[in-house]
Image: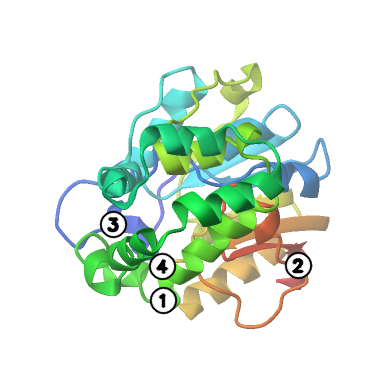
């Protein structure tokens, strides 16, 4: 494994500003890997942000995967999962669990939420969502939970500065968009978000062949042989990085990209202009404002 110097907030391995060891931030990835599977040429070599390992494991049967993460605790956790260890709750799951503990107060009884998640017709889902779940009490509660004041208690400024205003309203819109487009019954991300039930599929045999690297993404790609990757799944690593780091990362991706390589970049932020390459509506995880899928050369 290789170590390098980083220039993003992810380096500390913590969401907060407190001193202490790095943590597992994500017990699961809330990123729909079907986006990558549809975007990348089968058989190609893919650069992947390791995170909890979910995307890397989905890609491994069809690709040679290099999984990179700057957070040692997160990388070690992904490595354990690749050889069959069970999942755990990371810091992100802890925050979501805290919020879900209060949802019965706004009428989100478990039986009601399960009935919603059992639906498989989007028209019925939209009606149920509007009538039983997207209530005024829920709206007020989510606005409070996702307010800057509340989020500052958990997240350091670099993880908040890029977020859009009125985040509660925007997140409800993203949820409604998902329920109008994707069947709940076959959407594991909806169950994970609303109930906290995380699937624990065994890793594919190919997961043992994933190469794990402890490094900053930009620094690793700057050292990689030119033209050595056919795909890049970058998660949302620019949520928590400044513009200078973004420019550095994009230059490194272009350098390491083989002809025809494709890059996928997510963000909780909102696109400032209409992006024809934005596939956020297709991502069943429903959390993202941007899922940018474009040729690496066009970054």
* Helix, strand or loop at mark 4: helix
Q: Nearer the viewer, residue 145 or 139?
A: 139
- The answer for how far apart the CA atoms under marks 4 and 1 are is 6 Å
Examine the rendered structure and indicate whether residue 201 appears above or below residue 217.
above
Q: Position of residue 5 (x, y in %)?
A: 38, 60
Quarter holding the C terminus is bottom right
Q: Please report the residue visible at 34 percent of the width from the left and 68 percent of the height from the top.
A: 143
Indicate which disc residue 121 carries: none
Contact (Cβ within 8 Å) of mark 3 with mark 2: no
Query: Which of pointers 4 and 3 indicates the residue nearer the eye?
Result: 4
Badge 3 or badge 1: first in the primary sequence? 3
Q: Nearer the viewer, residue 7 or 173?
A: 173
* Helix, strand or loop at mark 1: loop
Q: Position of residue 47 (x, y in %)?
A: 63, 47
Q: Position of residue 28 (x, y in %)?
A: 45, 38
- The answer for how far apart the CA atoms under marks 2 and 4 are is 25 Å
Disc 4 target residue = 168
Q: Furthest residue to the bottom?
A: 273
- The answer for how far apart the CA atoms under marks 3 and 1 are is 21 Å
Q: Is residue 101 left or right of residue 261?
A: left
- The answer for how far apart the CA atoms under marks 3 and 2 are is 29 Å
Q: Is residue 197 left or right of residue 102?
A: right
Identify the image quadrant of residue 288.
bottom right
Quarter holding the N terminus is top left
Disc 3 target residue = 15
Badge 2 or badge 4: first in the primary sequence? 4
Disc 1 target residue = 166
Q: Position of residue 147 (x, y in %)?
A: 30, 70
Identify the image quadrant of residue 109.
top left
């Amino acid at each position: 494994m290789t170590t390098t110097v980083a220039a993003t907030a992810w380096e500390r391995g913590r969401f907060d500003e407190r001193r202490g060891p790095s943590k597992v931030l994500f017990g699961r990835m809330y990123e729909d890997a079907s986006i990558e599977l549809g975007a990348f040429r089968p058989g190609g070599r893919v650069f992947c942000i390791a995170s909890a390992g979910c995307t890397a494991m989905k890609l491994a049967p069809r690709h040679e995967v290099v999984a990179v993460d700057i957070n040692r605790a997160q990388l070690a956790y992904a490595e354990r999962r690749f050889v069959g260890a069970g999942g755990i709750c990371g810091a992100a799951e802890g925050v979501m669990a805290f919020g879900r503990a209060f949802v019965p107060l706004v009428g989100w009884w478990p039986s009601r939420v399960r009935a919603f998640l059992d639906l498989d017709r989007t028209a019925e889902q939209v009606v149920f969502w509007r009538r039983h779940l997207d209530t005024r009490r829920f709206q007020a509660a989510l606005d409070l939970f996702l307010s800057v004041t509340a989020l500052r208690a958990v997240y350091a400024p670099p993880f908040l500065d890029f977020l859009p205003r009125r985040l509660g309203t925007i997140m409800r819109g993203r949820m409604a968009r998902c329920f109008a487009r994707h069947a709940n019954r076959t959407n594991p991300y909806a169950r994970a978000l609303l109930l906290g039930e995380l699937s624990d599929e065994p890793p594919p045999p190919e997961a043992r062949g994933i190469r794990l690297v402890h490094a900053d993404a930009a620094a690793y790609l700057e050292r990689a042989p030119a033209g050595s990757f056919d795909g890049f799944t970058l998660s949302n690593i620019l949520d928590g990085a400044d513009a200078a780091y973004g420019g550095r990362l994009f230059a490194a991706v272009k350098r390491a990209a083989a002809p025809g390589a494709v890059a996928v970049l997510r963000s909780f932020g909102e696109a400032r202009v209409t992006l024809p390459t934005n596939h956020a509506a297709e991502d069943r995880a429903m959390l993202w404002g941007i899922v940018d899928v474009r040729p690496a050369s066009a970054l």
